[in-house]
Amino acid sequence: MKSQTKEPLIIPVTGKAIVSTPAADVKAMIPTPAVSKSEKALITYRKVEEKDYENILSLQQENFRSGVTEEDKQNGFLSAKFTKDQFMAMNEDLGIIVAIKGKILVGYLCGASFDYCKQFPLLKETIDDISTHQRKINDTPMTSENTFFYGPVCIAKEERGQGILEGLFYALKKVAINHVKHYNNCAFFMSPDNVRSSNAHQKRLGVRNIGSFFSQTRNKEFYLFARELEVPKLIANPAVQMTGFGSRLFSGKIQLWSLDEVRSNNVYRP
Ligand SMILES: CC(C)(COP(=O)(O)OP(=O)(O)OC[C@H]1O[C@@H](n2cnc3c(N)ncnc32)[C@H](O)[C@@H]1OP(=O)(O)O)[C@@H](O)C(=O)NCCC(=O)NCCS
């Protein structure tokens, strides 16, 4: 069994700071002792903390569809926006995982119950489509009892293409499986013009496009994406295949995982 990390790893790095403080000030504040390349590249995953919300809101603002140029939209964009209170409630409801590089928040992924998400029009339309059409995974209808709503997910522009999506997903998966509902699946909407996100989710996470629906509130079509948590299908990278899962329940304490750890279903940090 691997030794447990009690304190968050603190590895100063250079790079874009996702904080509201001007970038120049942030750079000046960050000490830069010699660190190895592998330490610089180390990205860890943990549940969100109070101090993270400001950085999540900044990342959300940078990537919300109305602020992203047409050219940049090819690299993904967010279709729904949330306030700090809403993010906090989502975290209470199921969980938010953040990806940390050094001390910098470089990505986040949220998950919440259908009941919580129904208050947001586009999310409600997604959930209504699932129940109206009795959308299934492996011949089992998805319900609010066995499926959670995945997203939003966002990774800082400079940090994309490194597997952070996988790290965020596998950390959230741990939380979801160990939630009192013991979720089996996740589902979410996908804008058809978000090609990068669509490719990344299908190729990296084995998420499947299982239908589409017309959103009255957005006046456009959205895809319905879903995945079982335990049995990944269509995984392009065999290194991310999962097996089994420990039986201990998630304690809700701050946890910190490396990508290798979140890929391994057998690692548990109380
Ligand atoms: C969507 C997002 C989370 C994906 O994470 P990522 O780190 O960028 O994913 P990856 O770079 O590993 O992409 C994986 C696949 O996407 C595809 N991809 C990469 N760049 C692409 C581009 N410019 N256009 C289309 N597809 C692209 C490739 O198929 C790639 O797989 P491959 O390298 O094996 O060919 C991230 O891009 C992001 O946060 N974007 C902004 C916000 C967003 O769109 N959120 C999702 C809303 S549903």
Image: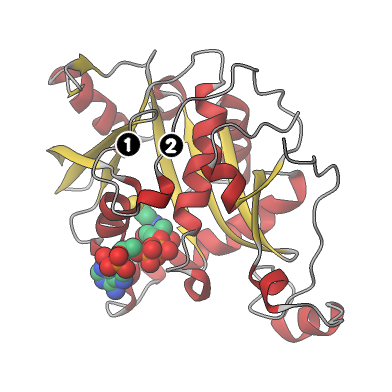
Residue drawn at x 50%, y 23% is 177
**15 with respect to 142 (left or right):** right
Asked whether, in this view, residue 42 is left or right of residue 206, the answer is: right
Of the residues shown, which amino acid type is indicated by label 2?
Met
Label 2 crowd (10 A; few <14 / some 14-19 / many >=20)? some
Whether residue 195 is situated above or below residue 120 in the rendered picture: below
| Mark 2, residue position | 242
Q: Marks 2 and 1: in contact by CB < 8 Å? A: yes
Residue 103 image position (x, y, % from top left)? 75, 64
Q: Judge whether residue 56 can be spotted in this image.
A: yes
Q: For this view, does 76 lie left or right of residue 20?
A: left
Question: In the image, is residue 166 above or below residue 254?
Answer: below
- Whole-percent x and y of residue 104? 70, 65
**Ligand 1 is within 8 Å of the C-beta of the residue at disc 1:** no
Q: Is residue 78 visible?
A: no
For residue 218, which numbered disc appears in the image? Answer: none
* Residue 107 position within the rendered picture, expressed as x and y whole percent measured from the top left: 55, 58
From what the image shows, is residue 236 above or below residue 207?
Answer: below
Which of marks 2 and 1 precedes in the sequence?
1
Q: Residue at x 83, y 85 (%)?
A: 28
Q: Position of residue 38 (x, y in %)?
A: 67, 72
Callout in the foreground (1, 2): 2
**In this rendering, would 146 be left or right of 52?**
left
Tell me the residue that label 1 is attached to.
Answer: 232
Q: Secondary structure at mark 1?
A: loop
From the viewer's side, name the closer residue of 87 and 165.
Answer: 165
Location of residue 137 with respect to 37 vertically, above or below: above
Amino acid on which disc 1 is placed: Pro
Q: Quadrant of the C terminus?
A: top right
